[in-house]
Amino acid sequence: MFRNIWINPQHTSLQRVLWRHSKSDALQCLELDTVTYGTKSAPYLACRTMLDLADKHMVTHPRAADCIKSSSYMDDYLCGAQSLQECIQLCSELTDLLSRAGFQLHKWSANHPHIYSHILSLDSTTQNPTLETENNSNSFTLIGSVKTLGLQWLSTQDTLTISIPNFEENVPCTKRGVLSKIAQIFDPLGILAPSTILAKILTQDIWKQNTDWDSLISSDLQETWNKFISHFHNLKSINIPRYYFSDIPTHIILLRSSDASHKAYGACLYLKATYPNSKPTCTLVTAKSKVCPIKKQQSIPRLELCGALFLSKLVNRFQDATKNKININNVYLFTDSSIVLSWIKLPYKNKHSTYVTHRLMLIIDTTCGSGRWRYAGGDVSWDCMGDLGMV
């Protein structure tokens, strides 16, 4: 990718290299005319070139330009369409647009065989790391999953799964060993939040003991760790649908909830969709959890307030990521703390501490006022497992 991008001729003098074809030749001082891999500016120049290419062809290739601008990560593109025909058209637009700048798309992945047939018709040299052709035909056989930003995408099933590290049980548990294994857990969507919060709490408990890095942790923490990894392996079987909806929805509601305990607090987002000819669906979008600070113990209402702020920031990130992609009709935020709800509804009625006032203002600014907040009563909150933990 980098070698297909020219740099400003005035800057080539900054990319000088010494070169000779053989030991008997004299050294030559050459200047590199293209972006060089390994330089600090290379990733920026590559991404900026892609954005400039999209801007120049926004009129002739609208779908492809939008995909490049909003659904790209370096030289990878993750995009789709509502119908098979639209998706095939998007493939054609992307291939044509990038080829105009000398870039060739390869290693495609899709959830429908007709898309692969179309891709092969565009370029017979197309490669795919997870699907192989049989007898040069347009039939495909699944031989693996696709790694997508840290997640595993099973394209034939159109589901996502989390890569679970292989933890060894009944081995010496040192502070260094346990923390290094916990750091291997990567769950960007928070699907495993009820379990990963236990690992975060364990990390905090280990840190409280103030032991050396290569010293064994206490026996009770070792027992907790062994119990955690014995149950964590069972999460390998969890698959979640990639697509939020079962059909084209007519009405979409974004539901958000937060909760807290004396050890942790968390937040989760759901999308509820209604359809003209089928039952409504409610899908977990993302969840996040965080351990409570240990330097200064806070009251439960204050921790609930931190959970509400945590939720507000999570909502903002989700809405920014899905802008112009998901048309959300209504937004509701829930908390099971009547104290926090009264603070949000009437932020100026009582004089609060600086700690509370600062977080209240952030919540109100982030969620565009207090009108969206509701009280979630009952014995069990939607995301109570995110702050209590479970295996």
Image: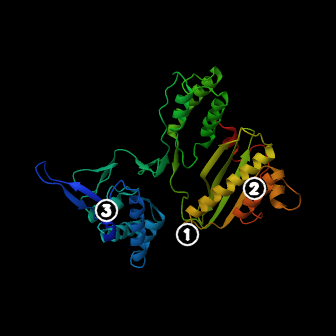
* Distance CA(mark 1)–CA(mark 3): 27 Å
Q: Quadrant of the N terminus?
A: bottom left
Q: Is residue 360 visible?
A: yes
Considering depth in this image, is 60 or 29 the residue closer to the camera?
Answer: 29
> Which x, y percent locates residue 148?
44, 51
Q: Quadrant of the C terminus?
A: top right
Q: Which residue is mark 1?
A: 324
Check residue 359 in the rendering and tell me which mark sits there, or answer none.
2
Q: Earlier in the sequence, mark 3 or mark 2?
A: 3
> Which x, y percent locates residue 246?
54, 58
Residue 92: quadrant of the picture:
bottom left
Q: Which residue is mark 3?
A: 119
Q: Amino acid at mark 3?
A: Ile
Of circles 2 and 1, the one toward us is 2
Left or right of 157 in this view: 191: right
Query: Helix, strand or loop at disc 1?
Result: loop
